[in-house]
């Protein structure tokens, strides 16, 4: 029989390993953002819009950098959007393509199409390629992919302020 202390130690050890692994996966998809002087993965001019502190990488002190936190939240909000037209709330329409984009970090093949987030109340929309959603789900607004030639990287970036305005 294993003592309570040993069980607790094993639980703590497994929890630490899981957090380290999660951190490695998140960090592997993080790309630098232009104009981000505090290295929090969101451009300094965008920080006041989200009530973040310029010059501080973790405004709320929860251990997660500001840009990562905002990207993960926006990703979750996109996930739950209805996929059919609505006149009364934001919704998303997915456009499937007959090609793939390959993530150079994890080699995941992502459909080469994208999603259009539409806010009919504000008459605005935002288009994000599926590879952009892939990176957003890892906490990053900037994304890159290989499409036709291995080793030839293409880049893009999600505008967090525009996306948030579209989702509201």
Image (cartoon, rainbow, N blue to C red):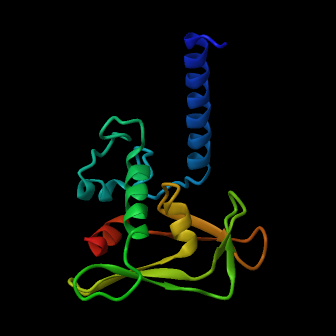
x 42%, y 58%: residue: 71
Q: Quadrant of the N terminus?
A: top right
Q: Is 49 rendered above or below residue 89? A: above
State the residue lying farthest toward the right: 150
Q: Compare residues 22 and 159 and report the one nearer the observer.
A: 22
x 54%, y 62%: residue: 135
x 30%, y 75%: residue: 166
Residue 113 horizontal/vertical position (percent): 57, 83
Q: Compare residues 155 and 11 and report the one nearer the observer.
A: 11
Residue 144 horizontal/vertical position (percent): 61, 66
**Quadrant housing residue 77:** bottom left
x 61%, y 47%: residue: 25
68 left or right of 19 in image:
left
Residue 100 horizontal/vertical position (percent): 68, 78
60 left or right of 97 in image:
left
Residue 49 horizontal/vertical position (percent): 24, 59
For the question of whether residue 35 can be seen, the reply is: no
């Amino acid at each position: 029989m294993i003592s309570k202390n040993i069980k607790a130690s094993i639980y703590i050890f497994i929890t630490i390993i899981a957090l380290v692994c999660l951190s490695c996966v998140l960090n592997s998809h993080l790309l630098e953002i232009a104009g981000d002087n505090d290295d929090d993965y969101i451009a300094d001019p965008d920080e006041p819009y989200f009530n973040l502190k310029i010059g501080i990488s973790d405004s709320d002190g929860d251990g997660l950098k500001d840009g990562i936190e905002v990207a993960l939240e926006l990703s979750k909000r996109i996930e739950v959007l209805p996929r059919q037209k609505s006149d009364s709330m934001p919704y998303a329409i997915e456009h499937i393509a007959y090609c793939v984009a390959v993530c150079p970090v994890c080699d995941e093949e992502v459909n080469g199409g994208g999603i259009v987030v539409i806010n009919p109340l504000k008459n605005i929309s935002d288009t994000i390629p599926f590879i952009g959603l892939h990176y957003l789900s890892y906490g990053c607004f900037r994304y890159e992919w290989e499409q036709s030639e291995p080793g030839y990287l293409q880049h893009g970036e999600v505008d967090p302020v525009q996306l948030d305005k579209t989702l509201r």
